[in-house]
């Protein structure tokens, strides 16, 4: 009924029918505005406000082609608020994820909002649904504020019918001074909120993801990629890695509540709360010289409920320019990991006063239903509360770590509380006053 009422007010336009001015206030008409091509903000536009009538919906026509429903390149002080965008993804399109070392602005079409080389972007009080690629894609831009935006049922699949990382909001390619706050992301097959840059590009810098909410995300709720000085604070989420058939098993893209990629430093993940994660709580691939504090991740099911379950927190080192150094992991609670609590590589790190509870749901290595001998020479790898590894992608020296006053509980945690790879010396690390306890 409601959809029929909207169609009565349908206005079908091409890019020439609505012309956005260079400056001032541009008011979209009420009702559904169907676009066959993008609304383009003129190059050099400045001090421009685009607003709707509350009931305004920009909807992509069946034959829509373009970077986004609204596109902007080279603007300054652009404000967009007060209407909805419907990508009209009535039949889910399939396309593969962009190959490595490709800017997303060049690779993905049919986004909601698309910005490049724009200084001063304010997006607020908007709804996005059924968008084929990204709800918002911002590249090579600065001074970005996104507040009270709702994104749902957006993103596409690849040829294998797995997620191709699309669906949410992405800030990429040396963008700076970005803030995303008070936004909601529901039913996104790919990543919900993230930063991305090429290895050859300057890193994104000086940003914050704060007080956002995530529900039913197929890949990562949050990813900080190739960035410096980013704060991920006070976010909440549930059902990360769901539905399971969207998980990108083809590329071993284990879902993560808070993920890291590239070279990331001077960054803080703090006060975030997630539950029901079919994957990892936190992945620190490329993370160094930063802090992980007072985060909570909780799983209440059994091992069988998490086919992509993993460690609660994993350090990693795939970026060639970084080594895992100087990370503080303190006062976090990880409750219900399929395997171990924390995988450590490199150092020196400080790992203290964490609560690692209900670990080793899989009961490695005593459960024939779960393959736990990832490396035959490291039987303790997946069944230990804290495991000190020698390497992931490259050899590192895991020594000088402070591991103290942690509470470690789970299946046979007294026997496998803190362990190390054959080439790593526990004595080369300061391990003190940890409480290790078996639970059923």
Image (tube, rainbow, N blue to C red):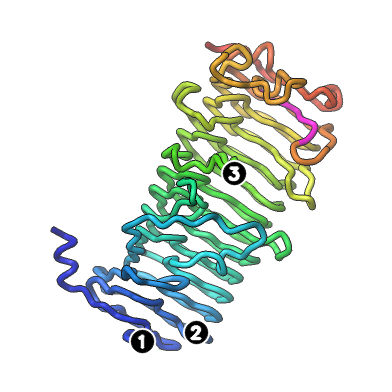
Which circle, 1 or 2, is nearer the viewer? Answer: 1
- Categorize mark 3 by other alpha carbons within 10 Å: few (<14), some (14-19), many (20+): few
Check whether the beta carbons of the residues at disc 1 and disc 2 lie within 8 A of each other: no
**Which mark sits nearer the N-terminus, 3 or 2?**
2
Q: Is residue 34 rendered to the left or right of residue 224? A: left
- Categorize mark 2 by other alpha carbons within 10 Å: few (<14), some (14-19), many (20+): many
Check whether the beta carbons of the residues at disc 3 and disc 1 lie within 8 A of each other: no
Q: Which residues are magenta?
A: 385-391
**Which mark sits nearer the N-terminus, 3 or 1?**
1
Residue at image x 52%, y 81%?
A: 75
Quarter of the image containing the N terminus? bottom left
Can you identify the residue that label 1 sits on?
16
Where is residue 199? Give x, y as percent.
71, 59
Can you identify the residue that label 3 sits on?
251
Where is residue 82? Give x, y as percent.
33, 69
Can you identify the residue that label 2 sits on?
46
Which element is circle 3 on?
helix
**Which mark sits nearer the N-terminus, 1 or 2?**
1
Residue at image x 53%, y 55%?
A: 96
Which element is circle 2 on?
strand
Which element is circle 1 on?
loop
Which circle, 3 or 1, is nearer the viewer? Answer: 3
Q: Is 288 placed above or below 84 here?
A: above
Where is residue 434? Give x, y as percent.
69, 20
């Amino acid at each position: 009924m409601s959809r029929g009422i909207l169609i009565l007010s349908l206005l079908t336009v091409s890019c020439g029918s609505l012309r956005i001015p260079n400056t001032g206030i541009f008011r979209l008409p009420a009702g559904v505005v169907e676009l066959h091509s993008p609304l383009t903000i003129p190059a050099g536009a400045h001090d421009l406000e685009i607003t709707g009538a509350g009931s305004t919906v920009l909807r992509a026509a069946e034959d829509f082609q373009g970077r986004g429903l609204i596109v902007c390149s080279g603007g300054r002080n652009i404000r967009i608020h007060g209407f909805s965008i419907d990508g009209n993804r009535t039949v889910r399109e399939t396309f593969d994820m962009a190959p490595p070392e490709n800017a997303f602005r060049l690779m993905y079409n049919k986004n909601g909002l698309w910005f490049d080389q724009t200084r001063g972007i304010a997006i607020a009080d908007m709804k996005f649904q059924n968008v084929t690629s990204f709800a918002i894609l911002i590249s090579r831009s600065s001074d970005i504020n996104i507040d009270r935006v709702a994104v749902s049922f957006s993103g596409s699949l690849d040829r294998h019918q797995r997620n191709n990382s699309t669906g949410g909001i992405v800030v990429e390619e040396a963008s700076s001074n970005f803030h995303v706050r008070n936004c909601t992301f529901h039913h996104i097959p790919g990543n919900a909120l993230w930063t991305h840059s090429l290895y050859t590009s300057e890193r994104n810098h000086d940003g914050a993801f704060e007080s956002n909410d995530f529900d039913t995300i197929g890949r990562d709720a949050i990813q900080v990629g190739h960035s410096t000085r980013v704060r991920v604070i006070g976010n909440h989420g549930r059902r990360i890695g769901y539905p399971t058939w969207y998980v990108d098993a083809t590329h071993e893209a284990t879902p993560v509540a808070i993920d890291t990629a590239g070279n990331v430093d001077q960054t803080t993940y703090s006060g975030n709360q997630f539950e029901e994660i079919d994957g990892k709580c936190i992945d620190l691939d490329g993370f160094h010289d930063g802090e992980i504090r007072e985060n909570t991740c909780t799983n209440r099911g059994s091992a069988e409920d998490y086919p992509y379950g993993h460690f609660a927190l994993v350090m990693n080192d795939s970026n060639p320019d970084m080594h895992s150094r100087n990370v503080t992991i303190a006062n976090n609670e990880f409750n219900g990991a399929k395997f171990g609590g924390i995988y450590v590589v490199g150092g020196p790190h400080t790992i203290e006063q964490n609560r690692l509870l209900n670990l080793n749901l899989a009961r490695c290595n005593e459960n024939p239903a779960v393959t736990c001998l990832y490396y035959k020479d490291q039987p303790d790898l997946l069944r230990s509360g804290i495991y000190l590894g020698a390497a992931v992608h490259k050899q590192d020296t895991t020594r000088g770590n402070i591991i103290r006053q942690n509470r470690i509980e789970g299946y046979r945690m007294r026997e496998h509380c803190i362990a190390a790879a054959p080439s790593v010396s526990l004595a080369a690390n300061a391990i003190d006053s940890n409480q290790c306890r078996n639970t059923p």
